Image (cartoon, rainbow, N blue to C red):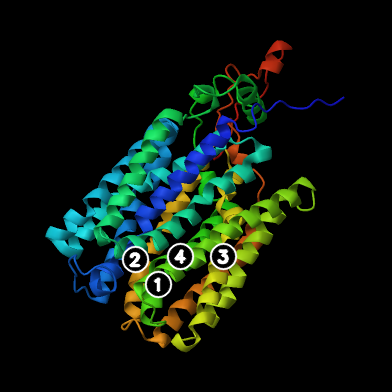
Amino acid sequence: MTAEINKGPLLGMRHIQTLLIFFNITCLYIGRLNVGVSVVAMTNADSTNPDFPEYDWMEAEKSYIFSSFFWGYILTQFLGGYLCKRFGVKGVMFWGVFVSGVCSALTPLFIGFGGWKAYCGIRVIMGLAQGMVFPCIHHHLAKWSPPAERNRLGALSHTGMDCGNVSAMFLSGMIAKSAIGWPGISYVSAGLAFAWCAFWFVFGADNAVESRYISKEELHYIESSLKHSEGYHKTVIPVPWMAIWTSAPFLALTLTRCCATWGLSTLQAQIPTYMNGVLDLDMKSNAFFSALPFLAMWIMSYVYLITADVLLAGNRLSLTALRKTFNSLAFWIPCATLIGIGFLDQEQKNLAIALMTISVGINSGATIGSSLNTIDLSPNHASILMGILNTAATVVPIVTPLVVGVIVHEDNNRAEWQIVFIIAAVLFFVGNSVFLYFGTAVSQPWDAEDYLTVKVPELAISPAIHEAGKGIDGPSEKSLI
C-alpha cells in the first residue's frame, strides 16, 4: 500500500527560506563584486561621470583593493560555522549582512579621506562580516531541505551567486554613468542589504519547528523526512575533527573548490579591466559585456537544475555520477575556452566575448557538481565543512589579484593576459581530475550523531537492548577518532 505524502502548500516555508537565501547571496555578491566596475569608474572618470573624483591608482594598488575583501573573509569562516551551530543561523546571518551593508554605505566616505588604503580597510571589514554568512547557508539548507528536494532547493538558492554577478557587473556600470556616479554603486548595495535584513527578520527561522508561519503538514513532512526528533534542535553534536581532516572525499572536494575559485574569481574581478584594456570597450559597452557571461551563467544554472531533476527522478544517474558529470562539464569546457581567449585581441573582440560567455556560462554546473557536496558528505556538520572549505578557498581570491598584478603590467597587453588565462585553465583541469577520482555524494560514517559517543556498559545501553533486559558485555568501547 502506498500513500501520497502531504507536503503542505505548493509554496511552503521551505521555499520561502530558499528564496531568502537566494536574495541573501545576491545582495552579498553585489557588495563583494561591484569593486571590479567601481575601480574602473574611479580611475577613469571620463568614461563614466566626470562630476565625481578620479584617482590615479597604480595596477599594484588596484590588485590590493581587489584582494582586500578576502583578507577579512578568510578569518571568520570557522567562526561563522561555530556560531551558527551554537546560536542558530538567523541571528548570525542577520548581523553578517547588516554589517556588510553598513560597510557599503560608508565606502565613499572612507575613500574620500583615505584613498585606496581606506578602501582596502573598509573591504576587509566587509569581508569579516560576510565570512560568517556562507557557512550558515549550508547549515540552513541542511535543516530545511528534505533529502528528496535538497539538490533542487540548494541549487535554486545558489543561483543567487549568478544573479549577484550579473547585477554587480551590469547595474554597477549603469549606476556609475548615472547622476549618482560611482558612489551610488555602494549606496545601492547598502540599501539592498538593509532591505534583505528586514525580510529575514520577519520570515527567517533556524528550522521548521521554530517557524511561525509553517503549516502542520509541511512541518511534519520536513521533520519526518529529516528524521529529526523534537530534541534534535537542542542537541549539539560533537564535531569529529580528526575524521574530517583525514577524509579523502572532503580533502578532494576542498582542492576542487579551490581550483574552481581560482578560475571564477579571476574572471569576476578582472573581466572589466580585460575588456577595457585588451578589447578596448567603453564603460557602457563594458558594463553590458562584462555582465553577459554571468547572465549566461544564471540562465545555464536553471538548465543544469532541470536536467539534474530529470536524471535523478528517472534514476538514470546516481547522485555521485550526476555531480561528477556536471562538474566535468563545468571545469573542462572552460579549460579549453580560456586558453582560446588568450590568443584573441580587439580585432576578434566578438569571438573573445563569445568564448568568455561560454566559459562562465558552462561553469555554472559546478554548483550542482561540487559546491553542494558538503551537504552530501555530512548534513549534520555541513556548516563546519563549509567553514573549512571556504577558509581554504578564500586564500585563492587573495592570491589571484596579486598574481594578476605581477603578471599584467599593462592592461592592453594581450600576451600578459594570456598567461593569466592559461594558469586558470590548468587549475580547472587538475581540480576536476581530483574530484573524479576521490569525490562522492555518499554520507560519510563520521556524520553519525553517535560517532564520537563513548560506549560505557552502565551508561550507553541502547533503548532497544535496555527494553529487552540485556546489557553489554566486555570492555568499554571508544572511537579511536
Which comes sooner in the sequence, label 4 or label 2? 2
Q: Nearer the viewer, residue 101 or 404?
A: 101
How many angstroms separate mark 3 from mark 2 (CA)? 20 Å
Which comes sooner in the sequence, label 3 or label 2? 2
Name the residue carrying label 3.
Answer: 361
Badge 2 vs badge 1, beta-carbon distance below 8 Å: yes
Q: Locate the C terminus by quadrant.
A: top right
For image coordinates 61% across by 71% down, the residue present is 333
Name the residue carrying label 1.
Answer: 286
User: Which picture quadrant has residue 101?
Assistant: top left
Specify the amino acid type for callout 4. Answer: Ala
SS assignment at label 1? helix
Specify the amino acid type for callout 3. Answer: Gly
Badge 4 vs badge 1, beta-carbon distance below 8 Å: no
Q: Between tags 3 and 4, which lies in front?
A: 4
Q: Nearer the viewer, residue 138 or 277?
A: 277
In the rendered view, tell whether residue 405 sits above or below residue 434: below
How many angstroms separate mark 3 from mark 4 (CA)? 11 Å
Specify the amino acid type for callout 1. Answer: Asn
How many angstroms separate mark 4 from mark 2 (CA)? 10 Å
Residue 87 — which label?
none
Which comes sooner in the sequence, label 2 or label 1? 2
Name the residue carrying label 2.
Answer: 37
For image coordinates 66% across by 16% down, the residue present is 463
